[in-house]
Image (cartoon, rainbow, N blue to C red):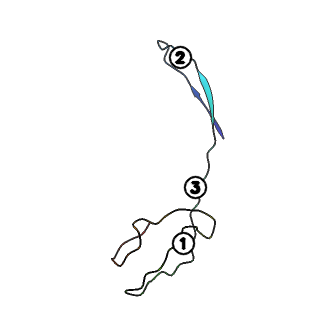
Amino acid sequence: NSIYTFTPNSDECAESIDIEIEIIPSTTPEFSIPSEICENELQELPTTSNNGIEGEWTPELNSSNSIYT
């Protein structure tokens, strides 16, 4: 956690205030999915990673060539 202080300019009608902000480190999702999918075969991608992170895949999986993030 870090404490930040807002200090207004002297000509403004405002008061200083301290704000505590919690910094949450990012986590990389981990998946056990095949690195290759056969032509004309659709692989359903999980919406929850092995380490419990929920999300969605964009773009949606289809039969075209794409890079997924």
- Of the residues shown, which amino acid type is indicated by label 3? Ser
The residue that mark 2 highlights is 14
Question: What crowding class fits label 1: few (fewer than 14 Cα within 10 Å), some (14-19), or many (20 or more)?
Answer: some
The answer to whether residue 2 is above or below residue 59 is above
Q: Farthest residue to the left: give it.
A: 64
Q: Secondary structure at mark 1?
A: loop
- Of the residues shown, which amino acid type is indicated by label 1? Pro
Q: Residue at x 37, y 86 (%)?
A: 40
In space, the residues marked 2 and 3 are separated at their CA atoms by 34 Å
Percent position of residue 52, x then y: 63, 65
- Label placed on residue 4: none
Q: Are marks 2 and 3 in contact (CB under 8 Å)?
A: no
1 or 3: tag closer to the N-terminus: 3
Q: Residue at x 64, y 38 (%)?
A: 2
Residue situated in front as seen by the camera: 14 or 59:
59
Question: What crowding class fits label 2: few (fewer than 14 Cα within 10 Å), some (14-19), or many (20 or more)?
Answer: few
Q: Farthest residue to the right: give it.
A: 1
In space, the residues marked 1 and 2 are separated at their CA atoms by 49 Å
- Label placed on residue 26: 3
- Of the residues shown, which amino acid type is indicated by label 2? Ala
1 or 2: tag closer to the N-terminus: 2
The residue that mark 1 highlights is 46
Q: Residue at x 41, y 73 (%)?
A: 61
Percent position of residue 57, x then y: 46, 66
Percent position of residue 7, x then y: 54, 22
